[in-house]
Image (cartoon, grey):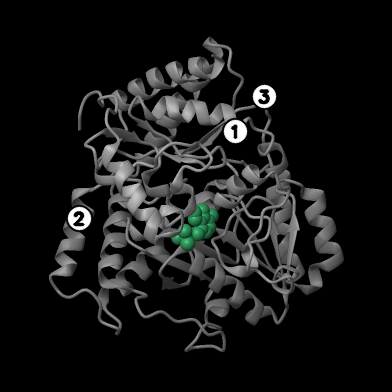
Amino acid sequence: PPVQPPAPSSTAQSEALFERAKRVTPGGVNSPVRAFRSVGGVPRFMASAEGAYLTDADGNAYIDHIGSWGPMILGHNHPAIRDAIVAAAAHGTSFGAPGWREVDLAELVCQITGVQKVRFVNSGTEATMSALRLARGFTGRKYTLKFRGNYHGHADALLVEAGSGLMTNAAELGAAAPSSAGVPDEYARLTLVAEYNDASALDALMAERGHEIAAVIFEPVVGNAGVLLPSAEFLAALDRVKGNGALLIADEVMTGFRLSASGATGRLGLTPDLSCWGKIIGGGLPVGAYGGRAEIMDYVSPEGPVYQAGTLSGNPLAMSAGLATLQALQADPGLYDRLDTYTARLAEGLQQAADSVGVTVWINHIGSMLTVFFQAGPVSNYTEAARSDTAAFAVWFQGLLKRGVYWAPSQYESIFISAAHGETELKVTLQAARAAFAEVVQ
Ligand code: PLP
C-alpha cells in the first residue's frame, strides 16, 4: 500500500460508470447508502481492495474506513481468506447438498459463541427474518418488539422505525419515523417500537404487552443510527425480557466477532436466547447465520415446524471464507485489544482536530466501531442522533474524500477499523480530518 494515498484527481471513470449504472439499476447502486445521496457528489466505483486501501476505477487510492460495512476485519484481500476461497473453488462452487465446510464452520461458531446449534443463511436480513419466525413458532405469539433506529435488514416486519439507510433517507425527507413504501400497515402493526436505552419504557411495555410478545430484537451496540452504546440499566432491562417468556434476540450482524470473539453480548455480559450474525462470519462472501439453544433451534425445519431454506445456504466458497476468517481471528487473540487501542487513538485525535478549529462534535466509539456526530451530544438514542448537523457532516465527508480518506457516506453509520490499519493510516487520516474540519467552519 502507498505510504501516503495520493489526493484523488480524476473521477471521470466513476462518473461514466455512475451514468451507465443509473440507466439500468435504481439510483445506480445495489444498496442505497452507496449512492452518496446524503453527502452529494459522485459515488466512487471501486476496482480493487488491499489491506486498508480501496482503489477506484480512476486509480485513486483511499484509506478505507468502511471495510465493506463490517466484514473485512482482517483487511481487504487477506491472503489466508483468498487462498481458502480459491482452494474451495477448485472443488466446485455449489453442491445443493451438505458438505464438510458447513459442519466445520458450525462447530467453530458454536465453540466461539456458546450457542448449541446454528443455521447458515445468505445475509444478515435472512438471519433476523428467520430468527423472528422461529421465535414466533417457538412461543406461539404474534408480536415482536424492536428499538427506534435499530436496523435489522430489509424484511417487511423489521422496516419499522429502522436505522441505517432508512435514517439517512428520513433525514433527507424531514420525516420523523422512517419506514418503507410497500410494507403493509398490517405487518408493521405486529412490530412494537420502543426507544433504545430507555429501560423504564421497555419494562413498562413488557409489563403491559409482554404476554403477547414473541421476541425482543435489538442491536447490543447500535451501528445503524451511528454508534450508540447501551447503558447498564438498559442491558439489565433487556435481560429481564427473558423472564416474560419472550425470546431475546441479539442482532450481532455488525458486532459479532467484531467487538470480541463472542460479540457485543459477550463483551457486555448479556446472554440472549437467539443470536444473528452476518458480515464477518462470511469473511466478505454472502453469509448470515442464526443460532441459540438446541431446544429452540430444533423448531427449525426439517427437525421442527418452522420452515426456512436456501438454495445457496452453506455454500462451500462462502463457508471457506468464513472459516478462514474465524480461524485467523482465533489465532490472534491480541487483535481485539489492538483494534480498541487504534480506534481510541483515532477518536482522541478526531476530537482534538475538531476542537482545534472550533467544530463541535460528539464521538461515540467502542472496539473498532466509531461515529463522529456533528453536534454537542450526548448521543444515546435515535432521537438524539437525529439532531446532528448532516450538512456539516457532508462537508467534512467531502473534505476527507478528496484527501484520499474514505469514510461512511452518512452521518448515521459506524466506521469499521481493521487489522490492516496502522500508524501511517492513523496519521494520514487525522491530517485529512483536521483539514476537512477547517472546511466545515468556512
Ligand atoms: N442487522 C444489522 C445490525 C445490520 O447492521 C445489517 C446490515 O447492515 C443487517 C442486519 C442486514 O444485513 P444484510 O445487509 O447482510 O442483509
Q: Amino acid at mark 2?
A: Arg
What's the amino acid at mark 3? Ala
Q: Residue at x 70, y 82 (%)?
A: 140
Q: Position of residue 8 (x, y in %)?
A: 29, 28
For mark 3, give the secondary structure: loop
Marks 2, 1: nearer the viewer: 1
Pointer 2 residue: 82
Residue 222 lies left or right of residue 206; in this view the side is left
Query: At which x and y percent is residue 20?
Result: 33, 53
Residue nearest the observer in this picture, 7 or 327: 7
Crowd rating for badge 2 (residues with CA inside 10 Å; few <14, some 14–19, many 20+): some
Q: Do the numbered discs 3 and 2 sit on residues whose CB atoms are within 8 Å?
A: no
Mark 3–mark 2 distance (CA, rounded to whole Å) = 43 Å
Q: Earlier in the sequence, mark 3 or mark 2?
A: 2
Tell me: residue 391, above or below residue 162: above
**Distance between the Cα atoms at labels 3 and 1?**
13 Å
Image disc number at residue 376: 3
- Gap between marks 2 and 1, in whole Å? 38 Å
**Residue 3 position (above or below residue 65):** above
Question: How many marks on residues?
Answer: 3
